[in-house]
Amino acid sequence: MLEGHLQEWLDLAFRWIHVIVGIAWIGTSFYFNWLNNHIRPPQSPEPGVAGELWSVHGGGFYRVVKYQVAPERLPTTLHWFKWEAYSTWASGVALLFVVYYLGPSGIAIDARRWDLPRWGLMLFGVGTLVAGWFAYDLLCRWLRSRPGWLATIGFGLAVGAAFGYSQVLTGRAAFIHTGALIGTLMAANVFFVIIPSQRKMVDAMSRGETPDPAPGAEAALRSLHNNYLTLPVVFIMVSNHFPSTFAAEWNWALLGGLALTGAAVRHWFNLRGRGQRNFWILPAAVAAMLALAVAAAPAEISGADVPDDVFAIVQMRCTPCHADEPTQPRVSAPPKGVVFETKADLAARAPLVAEVVASGFMPRNNATLMTDEERARVVEWARGG
């Protein structure tokens, strides 16, 4: 188990790397799908050319040409896009281990549901990622020619995975594991399908043969899948900052709704790029987001609902940091602006308190020596006990 500053610094390092390479990967995914959607027949037809696109950026003019299959000759320099995906997945898995598998056990394990040992948690988490890829890949090969059925069944399985995670793990860990599953599918698409398909085409050209277009078509399909999965997985990456989502009673259903809304927004952009105007998808997505926000809103709790003993524990163990003027050494401002000066402050943050106190993540390194009994009492109240 990682503890103290080592865990904190590893968390920071891998999270920073994950954000950087993740932006690079998602950026290339968005850009190449944007290119595909905006490619138009060339003004002057050229043999083997499917389309072209002219653009201006940074003071320069650019012409992008897309071939129907491949050019006549293999260029001297050919750029591949794969390390962004591999680095994002590797740094994400590293974070999964640092934060959830080697960090305080309460962050991932909810003993009320299933009190897994640490090795069991790792086996469960990694095993579901592997099983998820095989199920998805089989589904893609089975329903290759039926995209509607593929999308519907795939979405149902993803929501089922979120539900399964929520029955075993804490809400925060369930969300992150669902994101890790989606990210694994995306990275595996690159590693097992997209790059091998492209390599087959390049190898054929190296031998002086005409490439088979089928591998390229399969790679394009998986790339499109990844494009639709980006917005749902980006939301999950930042979801741990919003306990009103992962701490909700029906968190798995809420996550499914948010993922569907993100995919719909992505679909609107794709249609728009192809020149197919649609006026209802974006307003419907906004309305769905508002409806989900209303549905996920926690019940109103007033300061009068906070028992004196719970408030006393929070004042002793949490307020040294979470105060307008913290008294804890080396803490100059309340973390993330969260203060517990009054019972009303505490009541407004009940879902957040339930998650972070139950996980053992707070107080940080248990600097204020919160006892197990005190922790259990605060969590009992915060969860509506």
Image (cartoon, rainbow, N blue to C red):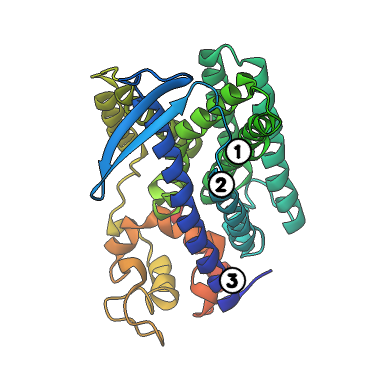
Amino acid on which the number 3 mark rests in the picture: Gln
In what element is the residue under mark 3? helix
Q: Nearer the viewer, mark 3 or mark 2?
A: 2
Q: Residue at x 41, y 56 (%)?
A: 352
- Is 346 on the left-hand or right-hand side of 144? left
Q: Quadrant of residue 350?
A: bottom left
Q: Quadrant of residue 145?
A: top right
Q: Residue at x 60, y 54 (%)?
A: 108
Mark 1 and mark 3 lie on one chain; the one further toward the N terminus is 3
Q: Nearer the viewer, residue 299 or 309?
A: 299
Amino acid on which the number 1 mark rests in the picture: Val
Name the quadrant of the N terminus: bottom right
Above or below: residue 334 compared with residue 381: below
Q: What numbered label is drawn on residue 13?
A: none
Q: CA distance from mark 1 to mark 2?
A: 7 Å
Rendered location of residue 197, percent (x, y): 64, 30
- Is 136 on the left-hand or right-hand side of 28? right
Amino acid on which the number 2 mark rests in the picture: Ala
Q: Within 10 angstroms of label 1, few (less than 14), some, or many (20 or more) residues?
A: many
Mark 1 and mark 2 lie on one chain; the one further toward the N terminus is 2
Q: Which residue is mark 3?
A: 7
Above or below: residue 326 compared with residue 94: below
Rendered location of residue 170, percent (x, y): 56, 49
Q: Nearer the viewer, mark 1 or mark 3?
A: 1
Q: Which residue is mark 1?
A: 190
